[in-house]
Amino acid sequence: MSPLIRNALAGLLLLTQTAQGMAMNKTDVNEAEVPEFEFTEHCAGRYQLELPADMKLIRSGYNDEAIMASVYPPEDQVHDTAYRGEQRVEEWQARVEVERLKEKVETGYVHQNLEGSLKTLVYYADRRKLPYLSEDPDAAHKFETFFLKDFPEVGQAIAIQGQGALGVVKRSEPDYKAIFRERLAGIQERAGHVEYHPWPHKKAGICLDREFVVVNTVAPEREGYSMKFYNGKRSEFTLMGGTYTSEERLKDVQSEASGMLAFLASSSMKVAGRKGRLFVSDGKYSETEREFRWVATDSKVNSFHNGHFVIEGSIEMKDYPEMAPMKGTDVIVGLLKSVKERPYGMLDAKR
């Protein structure tokens, strides 16, 4: 167990025992009384945290104005994610082809490059042939852009999707192909920033998991990310962060994050240096389960350092009997205290 988690749990154990009349001062807490429990350090977004060793990453997603990327467990066969093994490029190509064949209009590949570490596939779909667009001769061109960043030295690769490779360009625009090529080059450059760096590391930017990182030298215009961990039973932990360019939208998101919890008692609590409020409620199906949501209250528009930041989840104490006599709320506070801004995580962020 790390010193950070051990100290947090020791303090919480002291509070618990004091409330029960079992201890009166800090020296009464014997090191041996702190539960022996394994924790794993994770890199998530611009932060690092420690969670019980049985909590595994089950979903990670990132997006900015140019790209989207996600990571799911290796056994996941549904989502476009990280690929492993000798057939990783072929498996990715097959996945892109499945997406192309789902289109309801005629499509065709207009750009294919499988050389180098960044593989690229782009297909064109003439959406004007859809019924609701048939009367619109100026409907936007639509290019779907897919990348695979390959790391042959470790036998892994990660899929990346372009965000609006062409945007809204009218059919009357004669240079739409040149516009596409220019924008594709920019998106390719951004996709190239997804790199393989096993944790721990000191790379600026966004950790997708303990292996893949969106490495930034300069922060994007905007970003959003979410990482969810789950122990396969009743306990989970989700971290979400991002930026907003609209004050009104940020307020709406903050309000949505609090939701019905606003009617519950809450407490002020700093997490990773951010001011926020912690809401804790009883679980729906168990007396020993606690659901929680921590919401940053110091978020600012167009800020990476003070972007939208929410942590939520649930702790079922039956999953962790060795944590007794602490309560679910005690464990939640201990886990939140483990969250901190990782070294160099904000190096690229100037606002």
Image (spheres, grey):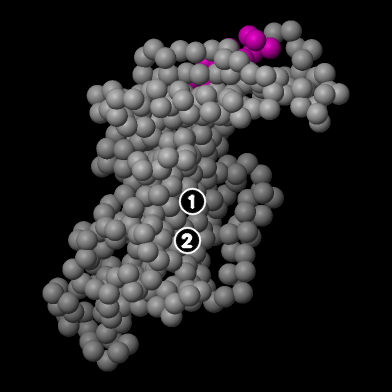
Q: Amino acid at mark 2?
A: Glu
Secondary structure under badge 2? strand
Q: Which residues are magenta?
A: 176-189
Mark 2 or mark 1, earlier in chain? 1
Q: Bin the neighbour count of mark 1 within 10 Å (Cα to Cα): few under 14, some 14-19, many 20 and up.
A: some
Q: Position of residue 320 (x, y in %)?
A: 29, 70
Q: Quadrant of residue 236?
A: bottom left
Which residue does the numbered mark 2 point to in the structure image? 312
Dividing the picture into quadrants, the one containing residue 72 is top left
What residue sits right under mark 1 in the picture? 240
Q: Is residue 245 visible?
A: yes
The percent coordinates of residue 181 (x first, y second) are 58, 12
Q: Marks 2 and 1, how far apart in space?
A: 9 Å
Q: Give the residue at x 59% y 64%.
A: 258
State the image coordinates of residue 76 (x, y, percent, origin top left): 40, 43
Residues 252 and 118: in front is 118
At horizontal 70% and vertical 19% (from top left) the residue drawn is 126
Pointers 2 and 1 in contact (CB under 8 A)? yes
Tell me if I can see residue 193 in this picture.
no
Percent of width and height locating residue 329: 40, 74
Image position of 241 with respect to 117: above or below:
below
Q: Main secondary structure of the magenta part?
A: helix
Residue most extreme to the right: 135
Horizontal side of residue 171 vs 234, given as left or right: right
